[in-house]
Amino acid sequence: MNSYKILEEKIKACRKCHLRDTCLQVVPGEGNFEADIMFIGEGPGENEDKQGRPFVGAAGKFLEEMLSLIGKNREDVFIGNVLKCRPPGNRDPLPEEVKACWPWMMEQIKIIKPKLVVLLGRHAMERFLPGQKISKIHGQAMRREILEIGKQVFYVLYHPAAALYQGSLRETLKTDFKKIPKVIEAIEKNKENNLDNRENRERKDGRNRFEEKKKQEALF
Ligand code: URA
């Protein structure tokens, strides 16, 4: 069994909080565990709980439609949620439930090593980029260092369900979504620059380190 499958089995067997007593099944996430892009929502809803798969309702349909805009389908990416079990009646999760589930998310990112983590909606955003406003940072790539996973690039989108309720967000979401390939390109270019910079640094014996670091961060 590969390391992702081992992790998935552990997630499915999790009993670290009480949500497992009321949900029908655990929804660990699905897709390509070697994907460049990982989409993360807040938690399973009723449909996801019934089917054991993330984003299978109306919001999921819209997500699939947007994936097709960039020439991808569900199998090309990884789709998951911060919470793996549905809170009863879709209530907001309690802090202790989020805390119990968080290490699974960290383990998933560590194994999948996506180039880009796309945060769907303000709840998912708040977990990774606390204190930000989605109206301000949607459609922007941000790099953040997280203790468990190190530096990671995040990209924030409005939640597909929000766009279904609020029609005006639909076009914004599609416009932001279509920028994803360019963000990936920038990440790859930045990585090359980092390697070049490392070689340069080694050659220059440590000179100008600060200037080079500033340039890299400015890309995002
Ligand atoms: N909304 C989410 O945040 N996640 C799902 O899996 C479905 C709807």
Image (cartoon, grey):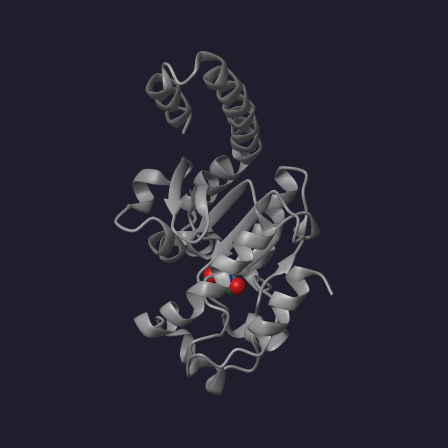
Q: Is residue 23 above or below residue 219?
A: below
Does the rendering let one see residue 220? yes
Furthest-right residue in view? 1
Furthest-left residue in view? 131
Give how far across and how far down residue 54 sits, in percent.
Answer: 57, 64
Depth check: 164 or 203 in front?
A: 203
Give how far across and how far down residue 17 sits, in percent.
Answer: 42, 80
Q: Is residue 127 above or below residue 151?
A: below
Give how far across and how far down residue 16 sits, in percent.
Answer: 44, 79
Determine the residue positioned at 33% across, 46% down.
134
Judge left or right: residue 140 versus residue 113: left
Determine the residue positioned at 35% across, 22% down.
214
Quadrant of the image for the C terminus?
top left
Depth check: 147 or 170 in front?
A: 147
Determine the residue positioned at 33% across, 54% down.
126
Furthest-bottom residue in view? 21
Judge left or right: residue 180 versus residue 120: right
Q: Is residue 130 above or below residue 81?
A: above
Q: Is residue 123 above or below residue 174?
A: below
Depth check: 158 or 10 in front?
A: 10
Does the rendering let one see residue 62? no
Residue 9 image-quadrant placement:
bottom right
Quadrant of the image for the N terminus?
bottom right
Give how far across and how far down residue 63 sits, in percent.
Answer: 57, 51
Residue 98 image-quadrant placement:
bottom left
